Image: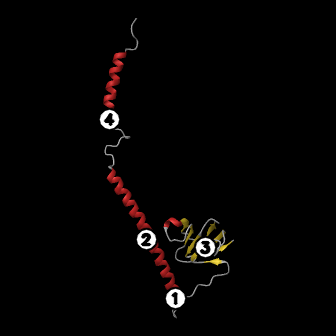
């Protein structure tokens, strides 16, 4: 009775296929694995970038605060606060539960540009921002009881 499935030729083709397959480049194998020292260098650079972002944010806030003081100084050198309608908040940082109550507020942009931020801390770092926005027209801001503070620049908000 003849063998319908020749084992020997099948094994030969299988071995040849495996050998050829080992020489064909695979997209799952990296020809040049990243050395550990390069990985460490990348992590160091990422840490430096994060530090620079924090410094840039701090300097930007300091510049804004100085500009606000210069803008608020009158001819007599005394600082004057802008008068806003009752229940309206303008530029500044407000503690939730003390200066501003949680809730929904309608906002308008009153400066050249507007900025708002919900904060988990008032330390001035980027990491303390929960959410923020750069509105160009009317907007709605919802302040949560879990927010530590809000920051407003170039906008005014009024409780609904």
Position of residue 122 measured from the top left corner of the image (x, y, whole percent): 54, 71
Figure check: 158 above or below 31: below
Q: Secondary structure at mark 1?
A: loop
The answer to which image quadrant residue 97 occupies is bottom right
Front of the two marks 2 and 4 = 2
The foreground one among 21 and 149 is 149
- Mark 3, other Cα within 10 Å: few <14 / some 14–19 / many ≥20: some
Q: Are marks 4 and 3 in contact (CB under 8 Å)?
A: no
Front of the two marks 2 and 3 = 3
- Mark 1, other Cα within 10 Å: few <14 / some 14–19 / many ≥20: some
Q: Give the residue pinned by disc 3.
A: 95
Position of residue 18 measured from the top left corner of the image (x, y, whole percent): 34, 28
**Distance in Å between CA atoms under marks 2 and 3:** 24 Å
Q: Give the residue pinned by disc 4.
A: 24
**Distance in Å between CA atoms under marks 2 and 4:** 49 Å
Residue lying furthest bottom in this view?
76
Which badge, 4 or 3, is on the more N-terminal residue? 4
Residue 73, which numbered label? 1
């Amino acid at each position: 009775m003849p063998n319908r499935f020749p084992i020997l030729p099948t094994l030969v083709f299988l071995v040849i296929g495996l050998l050829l397959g080992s020489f064909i480049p695979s997209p799952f194998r990296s020809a040049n694995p990243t050395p550990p020292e390069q990985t460490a260098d990348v992590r160091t650079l990422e840490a430096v970038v994060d530090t620079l972002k924090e410094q840039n944010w701090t300097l930007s806030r300091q510049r804004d605060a100085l500009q606000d003081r210069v803008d608020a100084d009158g001819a007599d050198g005394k600082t004057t606060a802008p008068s806003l309608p009752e229940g309206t908040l303008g530029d500044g940082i407000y503690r939730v539960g003390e200066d501003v109550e949680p809730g929904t507020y309608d906002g308008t942009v009153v400066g050249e540009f507007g900025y708002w931020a919900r904060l988990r801390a008032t330390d001035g770092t980027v990491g303390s921002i929960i959410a923020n926005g750069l509105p160009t027209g009317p907007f709605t801001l919802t302040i949560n009881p879990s927010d530590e503070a809000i920051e407003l620049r170039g906008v005014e908000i009024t409780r609904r």
